[in-house]
Image (spheres, helix red, strand yellow):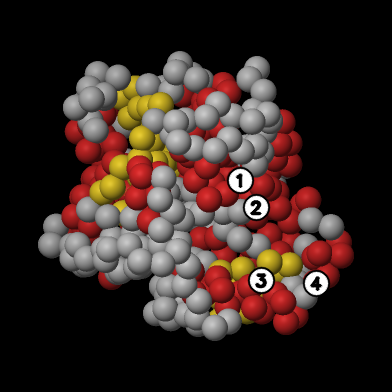
Amino acid sequence: MLDLNPVAPVREGVSATPFPVDLDDVYRAHELIRASLPDTPTVVHPLLTERMGCETHVKLENTHSIGSFKIRGGLFLLANMSEADRRRGLVTATRGNHGQSIARAASLYNARCTIFVPRGNNAHKNAAMSALGADVVEQGHDFDEAWEIAEAFAVQTGARLVHPAREPDLIAGVATTALEMIEQAGEPLDAVFVPVGGGSIATGMALVFKALSPTTRVYGVQAENAPAMHHAWQTGEERPFAVTDTIADGLAVRVPVDFTLNVMRELLAGMLLVSEDEIQDAIRCYANTIHQMAEGGAAAALAGAMKMRSEFRGKRIGVVLTGGNIDTETLLHALSGRPPMHVPQAMPMFPIDDLSYGY
């Protein structure tokens, strides 16, 4: 078994840093998570295989009770958190799925939970977080501004601050997806595609596959309208990008997350960008083949696989359907085959390394 704890091999131009979790952490997380969550299925459907031109294994993380893979990380984080930290209450920022995960896990431990979301955030996701017991506050024009406000709230109140991608326990928790996928797939997969927002699941999947199935190439996929992590991975320049409207709202990160980016630079086989039209096509493909609902961020992974299907013709690939929390209006628009809801409009990188909103 590969030891993932020491400093990783260095890709040219990248500084060596310790990996945030190791395989033992993931196994510990899986033992705990399995006590309260059933394994999600991995399905292979002939219609999807025919369309892709390769045997396509889809990990249905949308079948969790909150409709997202994020619950794995939330449960492991809260289980490992000290009672003193739980009594402080938790605060975080989110576009939805991370918030639902923290809200659900906090409710199981009777911990207070405050969640900041950007203005105009998906109303259905906001309602779900409130129903799970969180105090949901709409402030900020995007995730990163909402996060700055959450940081200020933590300083003012003493609440335990939880970042969606900078918590080792969250990464170890979501990495259990890979353990199940490897077991369910049987023979090694040639490639696996995962969406990238803050990078927690891409990091976790890459760590596990590197250890247990090293011939499997793991690809991250990001939306063209929110390309900060893609640009940083490709160039090494960790510059913020203005986030514009995208159907993949869960991937809309303006500022690159170096905590996960450093691992992805060393372990991912590639990072892809997909258009709004390609994401909508992937939503339709999921509905018409395996009959599953996929939110935009989750469908991005399949869109990336579709972009590379000629390279993997006749092979075996995996795709993680990370979530199904899509509102009716967006789903119907995607299924209709109409032009994308949001036009390509990603703005150039900001000419400064950091933005401050005065919080």
Place of residue 123 in the rendered image (x, y in percent of width and height, measured from the top left)? 43, 76
Residue 82 found in image quarter:
bottom right
The residue under label 1 is 171
Residue type, label 3: Val
| Quadrant in which the N terminus appears | top right
Residue type, label 1: Ile
| Residue positioned 43% across, 23% down in the render | 216
The residue under label 3 is 91
Place of residue 342 in the rendered image (x, y in percent of width and height, measured from the top left)? 22, 67
The residue under label 2 is 167
The residue under label 4 is 88
Residue 343 found in image quarter:
bottom left
What kind of element bears circle 2? loop
Between label 2 and label 4, give the one nearer the viewer.
2
| Residue 261 drawn above or below residue 243 | above
Residue type, label 4: Arg
